[in-house]
Structure formats: C-alpha cells, structure tokens
Image (cartoon, grey):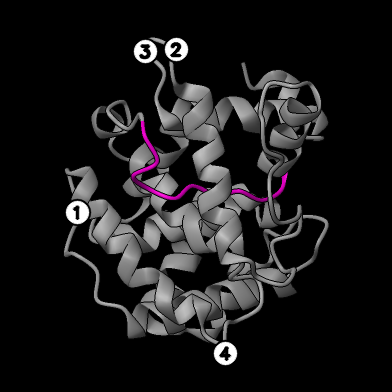
Amino acid sequence: MAYGEMQMALAVDEDADPWHVCFVVGLAWGRLARLEENFVAASIDFLQTGSRSSLITAQMFHYERGPLPIEQSLSGGRNLFAKVILPAGLPDDLQKLGRAQERWMPPILSKDRPRYIGSWNATAMFMTALFAKPALASTMTTAEIALPPGGPIFSALKILHEAGLLVRKPEGSELDDAAFEPGAIYVNTGLMADLVVGISDCSMIDMHSGLYMLGTRLPESDTWF
C-alpha cells in the first residue's frame, strides 16, 4: 500500500521537486494529514512558492491534532529546503541518499528547530524516498539510512524489548513534537537493523513497515494487509 501511495503522490505533479513530494508524504504518514491528491498538490505548491492559500488548503486535511501541526511542519520544511542543497533528483544509490540525509540533519539539530520537525519529520522524507524507489529499498539491509523512530515504531520496539527479542530498549518518545533526541534516531535504526539480521529477503523498509503494524493503535490498520 505504501509503495502505491508514494507513486500516487509523485504523479500529482510530475514537474515537482521529488524531495518536496517525499516530505509531504512523510508528513501525512506521521498521522498529521489525510494523504489525498489535493493535500499533496497544495502542500507541494506551498513548499515551492510559499502561497498562503495553498497552506490554508493543505491544513484542511488535518487529523485529530488539528491544522496547526500541518502549518508548522510545512513551514519548517520550506525553511529547511531553503537552507539545504539536496541532489536534483532522488538518488539511486544508498550512499548518495545517506549523504543527502547528512546534509539535511544539521539545521534540525540547531536550537532554532521548528516545532514538528522532530524525529519523525526529520527522517520520514528519506523513508518515503526509499518507497519511491522499490528496487533500491530492497537492497537496504543495514542501517545506512536513519529511519523514523517515533510513534508506532517506538511502541513496537518497546514491545519487542519487553518480550526479550531485543537486548536494548528503544530511546526517545512517541511524540514527534517532543524534545528532539537525535541519538534516538540512530539507536532505534540500529535496533531495526539487528532485527533484520538472519531474515532472508527482508529489507530495513520491510522491517520498519512491520514494526509500524505492530505498534500502531489505529483501528483502520486492520484493512492494511
């Protein structure tokens, strides 16, 4: 389902910066907005132009946390895109994608980090970039790219630790707007990599998706198989 949603979003505006599309999808998957074509189009336009009307349209697709997190996430993302130079297109190589993530992170670690650019929004764009390139995603079996650790992922890793399947408990919290703990991103990605070891035909993206299913509290997840 995730691969299909990513392709839908990329098709909304074929001339859009694919990094913008990946950021928007990551925001939606963080349970801040409904992933619909009009939301994607309005969000991309705001990231490109700063249009206030597009931002207002995007906010209309909010979930239970309301419109403000969408505004803060998109405004923070637009600010980051102005500061960070990313490759012209999504890389076809894990090392190049990793270097792009290394460029993306420093402004997020500064004292001026925008709200809702926490552990999920800081990394989700790179997860969605992998979903945009299924062949590349299938080759990622180690912690080359930091993946989102918050919310359902944190809960799932906690469950596995309590069950004795992980020797170390996860770090961080379930809230994306909580105090940012950059170390938690890398610790929890490392735990995911530990789980992949010894499982044939299982990538880090596969594991991340499985953890999301284990940790989510959303009733509609029953229909995601």
- Mark 1 vs mark 2: which is more N-terminal? 1
Q: Which residue is mark 1?
A: 96
Give the residue at x 35% y 29%: 141
Q: Nearer the viewer, mark 1 or mark 2?
A: 2
Three-letter residue code for mark 4:
Asp
Label 4: how many residues lie within 10 Å, few (<14), some (14-19) or many (20+)? few
Secondary element type, mark 3: loop
Three-letter residue code for mark 2:
Ile
Q: Which mark is residue 201?
A: 3
Secondary element type, mark 4: loop
Q: Observer-nearest residue: 219 or 213?
A: 213
Instruction: Confirm whether the magenta stretch covers residue 150.
Output: yes
Q: Real-space Cα distance between discs 1 and 3?
A: 23 Å
Three-letter residue code for mark 1:
Lys
Q: Quadrant of the C terminus?
A: top right
Residue lying furthest top in this view? 200
Asked if one can make out residue 155 in the rendered structure from this viewpoint, the answer is yes
For the record, the magenta segment spans: 142-151
Asked if one can make out residue 38 in the rendered structure from this viewpoint, the answer is no
Q: Are marks 2 and 3 in contact (CB under 8 Å)?
A: yes
Residue 161: image location, x then y, percent: 74, 30
- Mark 4 vs mark 3: which is more N-terminal? 4
